[in-house]
Image (tube, coloured by chain):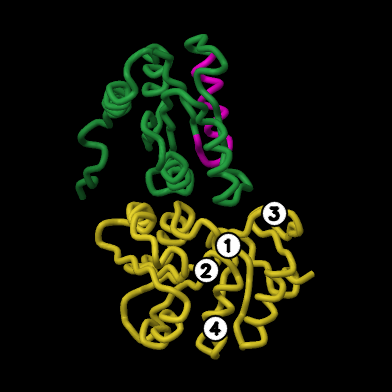
Chain colours: A yellow, B green
Amino acid sequence: MSIVLYRVDERLIHGQVVLGWGGELHPRRYIVVDDALADSEWEQDLYRLAVPDDTEVLFRGVAEAREALTEWAAQAIRTVLLTRDVSTMAALGSEGGLGGVEVNLGGIHHRPGRTEVRPYLFIGDEEREGVRSLVAGGVHVSGRDLPGGLRVDAEQILG
Amino acid sequence: MSDVRGVLVTHGAMAQGMVDAVRRISGAPDDALVALSNDGCSPEVLRDAIGGALGEGPVIVFTDLGAGSCTLAARLSCADRDRVAVISGVNLPMLLDFVFHRSLPVAELAERLAEKGREGVRILTAPKAHVDRPVPG
């Protein structure tokens, strides 16, 4: 399987992803699934600056990404797939395209209505609903900020 | 013309530590350089914090890592501002030069600081040439 990490992180492409996970997984492609970002070329350029020159970055909306998911997974290029929030990842997997994979929750921060699970992981109703939807679709959901960090499983996340 | 203000945005406690070091070394006034950390901040919260620290006059935002969330948030916060520079890869020589040259025009100062930062990285003691050679036999 060439998608080596499915991650939910509000910061999308940033140091922890490129250096922390990238150093462990050696991806050659990042795919960001985000409707707003897919329509904002100048913002895409900011994120592209964060990756090495030999690394590809794609920005796709949810509908287009859902169509392409099987193809991406079949390609040999080592890929990290990122969404900004759990609901986007759940929408991506709504037709079973994420069945059997592990989704990493790596950066969901404090906001009114969310409670702390870990310092990098705050969960509210929207996140719980997204996690339940993913789990119901056969996805293994866990929390971990960095490869060397402790893994938090879905039961702990849902409380 | 008003002096350029500095905003330092980093991971963890790096910003506060660097600002503390700059003040101890230079005696710079508190308002010359403001420290912000991305600890526990969502991208929106960090952008708001940087936006709030920019103020009205000329500003240089220093960040730690060009590929990091602090730099991205800084660039997004400064996108609509004319007299703002964002410099990544901050180091102490750069910041010390900044506090002593805040009266320069911001564009000229930014160029100068990037150069000072690069100049500040030197190998002062090199390992002996033979230490990495395999032992004969």
* SS for dot 2: strand
Left or right: B115, with B20 as reference point: left
Which element is circle 3 on? loop
Q: Tell me the quarter of the image containing the N terminus of chain A.
A: bottom left
Residue B64: x and y in percent read 44, 38
Residue placed most toward the observer, B125 or A159: A159
Question: How many residues crowd around disc 1 within 10 Å: few (fewer than 14), some, or many (20 or more)?
Answer: many
The type of residue carrying mark 2 is Arg
Res A61 quadrant in image: bottom left
**What residue would you read off at disc 3?**
A111
Q: Predominant secondary structure in magenta?
A: helix
> Residue B137, how many percent across, how many down?
21, 50
Relative horizontal placement of residue A158, taking residue B2 as reference (left or right): right
What is the chain letter for disc 4? Answer: A
Image location of residue A14, percent across then percent down: 45, 54
Sequence-earlier tag: 4 or 1? 4
Do pointers 3 and 4 mark residues of a single chain?
yes
- Residue A76 lies in the magenta-colored region: no
Choose the circle earlier in sequence order: 2 or 1. 2
Q: Nearer the viewer, mark 4 or mark 2?
A: 4
Write down the region rendered in magenta: B9-23
